[in-house]
Image (tube, rainbow, N blue to C red):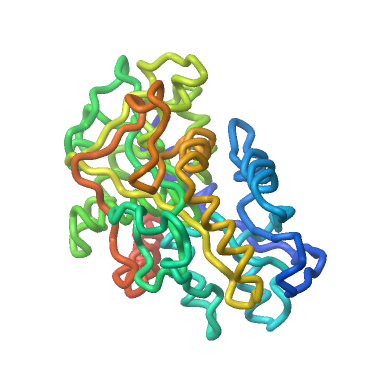
């Protein structure tokens, strides 16, 4: 793959997805006796092509409580609710499951009125067992419910695992790295933030210039990048450190599912549950939060989402523990740093890459 083709591939996939027209949802009562809890989430949480936790969560929650769980999955995802909040209309949901630090920063930056309301964590059993490394919201608007680390996944018969970020700019890795677009994807953005954290905001753009010159192929989505890797178009892809959990479960060739942590690091991917500020249904949302942090539920959803539990009193099943890789040095920029600089760093990256 030539370097010019690599840049063309990036430019072809660089556009962000436009928010589609708002999808209608049935309006629910705010009465605490109303027995349907409406939880918004990303479509993939409910019906991902490979594996997803949505069906298990719905069935198990309903079996343990008197509530009916209704998933709300509009095409615009979080943007749907940001737009409705801007318009001052009913959000038609009580909570959102899957909020990341980046989502929280973006929603706060686009709205005058808050989209989410903080939890009284003392009222949520097991919330005090959330690992400190996964906490990201100082206002506790989000309770972390799932985690992993962004890392490299590589084929050991094609390349050696790079020990440093600098190694990725060397001849041995020319045309060997696939990456989802940082402008519009989580894995791409977290990899970008990882380079800022490690190399510094004064040096990360120079690093990216050398990385692009070495033939990194930036594609439109994580699925695009991972599918290209699966088709053996390159020897490495930016993905997740729990990649081997899924590979082992599917009895795949583990030689193509090696996990690499440049500089001994991995960037923490964390998401969680947030309560919409407009809901008055505190009790069912709090009950759902308690359910999502239950150790048994944490274990089961971690397996189904190919992730890691966020609470200290839960772990993956023994047969998967060896496959969930954790870096020696977890990296996660604070909420305040992201709120101040994330968009500027990403905009500068777009200007730098798109102009060459």
Residue 150 spot, x, y in % from top left: 36, 43
Q: Compared to 290, does 345 lie above or below?
A: below
Q: Residue placed at 27% from the left, 32% from the top?
A: 260
Could one spot residue 224 in this view of the protein?
no
Q: Residue placed at 80% from the left, 69% from the top?
A: 27
Q: Compared to 65, does 91 lie above or below?
A: below
| Res 29 → quadrant | bottom right
Nearest to the observer: residue 173 or residue 323: 323
| Res 54 → quadrant | top right
Could one spot residue 6 in this view of the protein?
yes
Residue 291 spot, x, y in % from top left: 55, 51
356 horizontally vs 330: left or right: right
Quadrant for the N terminus, please: top left
Count numbered badges in the picture: 0
Residue 151 spot, x, y in % from top left: 33, 39
278 horizontally vs 296: left or right: right
Q: Compared to 210, does 1 lie above or below?
A: above
């Amino acid at each position: 793959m030539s370097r010019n083709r690599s840049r063309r591939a990036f430019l072809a996939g660089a556009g962000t997805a436009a928010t589609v027209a708002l999808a209608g949802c049935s309006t629910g009562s705010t009465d605490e006796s109303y027995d349907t809890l409406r939880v918004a989430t990303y479509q993939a949480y409910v019906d991902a092509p490979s594996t997803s936790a949505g069906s298990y969560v719905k069935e198990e929650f309903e079996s343990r409580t008197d509530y009916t769980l209704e998933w709300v999955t509009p095409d615009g995802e979080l943007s749907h609710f940001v737009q409705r909040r801007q318009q001052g209309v009913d959000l038609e949901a009580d909570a959102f499951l899957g909020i990341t630090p980046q989502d929280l920063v973006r929603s706060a930056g686009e709205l005058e009125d808050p989209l989410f309301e903080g939890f009284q964590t003392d009222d949520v059993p097991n919330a005090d067992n959330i690992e400190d490394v996964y906490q990201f919201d100082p206002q506790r608007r989000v309770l972390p419910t799932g985690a992993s680390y962004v890392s490299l996944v590589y084929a050991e018969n094609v390349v050696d695992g790079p020990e440093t970020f600098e190694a990725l700019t060397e001849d041995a890795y020319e045309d060997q790295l696939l990456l989802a677009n940082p402008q519009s994807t989580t894995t791409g953005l977290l990899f970008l933030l990882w380079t800022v954290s490690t190399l510094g905001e004064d040096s990360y753009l120079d690093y990216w210039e050398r990385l692009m010159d070495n033939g990194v192929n930036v594609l439109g989505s994580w699925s695009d990048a991972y599918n290209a890797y699966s088709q053996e178009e390159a020897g490495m892809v930016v993905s997740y450190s729990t990649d081997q959990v899924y590979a082992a479960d599917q009895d795949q060739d583990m030689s193509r599912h090696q996990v690499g942590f440049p500089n001994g690091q991995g960037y923490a991917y964390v998401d969680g549950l947030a309560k919409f500020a407009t809901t008055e249904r505190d009790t069912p949302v709090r009950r759902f939060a308690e359910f999502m942090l239950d150790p048994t539920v944490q274990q089961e959803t971690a397996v189904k989402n190919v992730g890691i539990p966020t609470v200290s009193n839960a772990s993956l099943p023994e047969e998967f523990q060896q496959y969930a890789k954790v870096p020696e040095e977890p990296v996660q920029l604070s909420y305040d740093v992201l709120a101040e600089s994330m968009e500027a760093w990403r905009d500068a990256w777009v200007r730098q890459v798109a102009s060459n």
